[in-house]
Amino acid sequence: MSDISSGERRPPAGNSAASGNMEAELMRILIVEDEQKVASFLRRALEEEGQAVDVEHDGEAGLQRALTYDYDLVVLDWLLPLRSGLDVCIAIREARTGTPILMLTARDAVKDRIAGLDAGADDYLVKPFALGELLARVRALLRRGKTGAPKLVVGDLTLDPARHRVTRAGQEITLTAKEYALLDYLMRHAGQSLSRTMIAEHVWDFDFDGGTNVVDVYINYLRNKIDRGQERKLIHTMRGVGYCLESRNALSE
Ligand code: CA
């Protein structure tokens, strides 16, 4: 149990975590579950699938985290201290749309199931469940989230989440999993100034140590692949802030 501490953020289980999977893309999953054993079991299982996992043990902390960070999926227990899973689900839906929610519960009554789905949950699993079924549902929700995702376009740069493909001016660009995740994040927030901390927390999934230059290193890798030799640069350094991906007039910067 020593590896479970509320809100602890750990790096995903090694860089190779994603490589065994069909998808090289790192997905971020938040588990809100007060039973430590279940939470730790789920975390391990999902990390083995190559996902980056955060855990909270009560509804209040879970909601805060879900609203603070971008998650690709929230696995939400129904009965939680401080705030029920149903409440959390409603609040997440009120605050933002899109993040798929899988509710877990010991409740099997049809009216509870309806209440959960009405609250905005995308799927529902009754405890005790088979791990295989949970993982299959998680994959289905992540896939659904992705397939529904339109292509991201900034200038002549295109990222197709469904096909995991990046092109600039029609030329395919080959990226590593990390470079892809970084570009995906930059493109989803195109035109915004993103701090190194924001980038690191989303793309690397660990508490950002201001002393590391990993973000700058990867921005350079991306620049070499995306902007090198191009008249119009898309990745811009925001002095004292971080970075911004944007198609600007050729003369600026
Ligand atoms: Ca519970």
Image: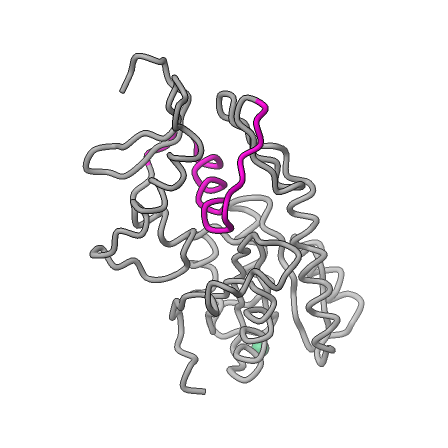
Left or right side of 251 for 165: right
Question: Please, is residue 195 above or below residue 36 in the view?
Answer: above
Residue shown at the point (65%, 62%) measured from the top left: 102
Question: Which residue, as the protein is rendered here, is positioned at the far bottom?
Answer: 1
Left or right side of 224 for 88: right
Q: Position of residue 97 (x, y in %)?
A: 58, 44
Question: Please, is residue 96 above or below residue 155 in the view?
Answer: below
Quarter of the image where the N terminus is located: bottom left
Question: Please, is residue 150 above or below residue 39 in the view?
Answer: above
Which stretch appears magenta? Answer: 170-193
Q: Is residue 153 magenta?
A: no
Residue shown at the point (70%, 78%) measured from the top left: 127
Q: In this figure, which colouring scheme has been used for the structure?
A: one colour
Q: How many marks?
A: 0
| 218, 161: nearer the viewer | 218
Q: Position of residue 10 (x, y in %)?
A: 40, 68
Question: Which corner quadrant of the figure contains ligand 1?
Answer: bottom right
Query: Could you say which quadrant of the image residue 48 lies in?
Result: bottom right
| 213, 99: nearer the viewer | 213
| 186, 218: nearer the viewer | 218
Residue shown at the point (36%, 13%) measured from the top left: 249
Q: Position of residue 110 (x, y in %)?
A: 80, 67
Question: Which residue, as the protein is rendered here, is positioned at the far right?
Answer: 110
Residue shown at the point (71%, 81%) measured from the top left: 128
Query: Could you say which quadrant of the image residue 122 lies in?
Result: bottom right
Q: Is residue 191 magenta?
A: yes
Q: Position of residue 188 (x, y in %)?
A: 49, 37
Quarter of the image where the C terminus is located: top left
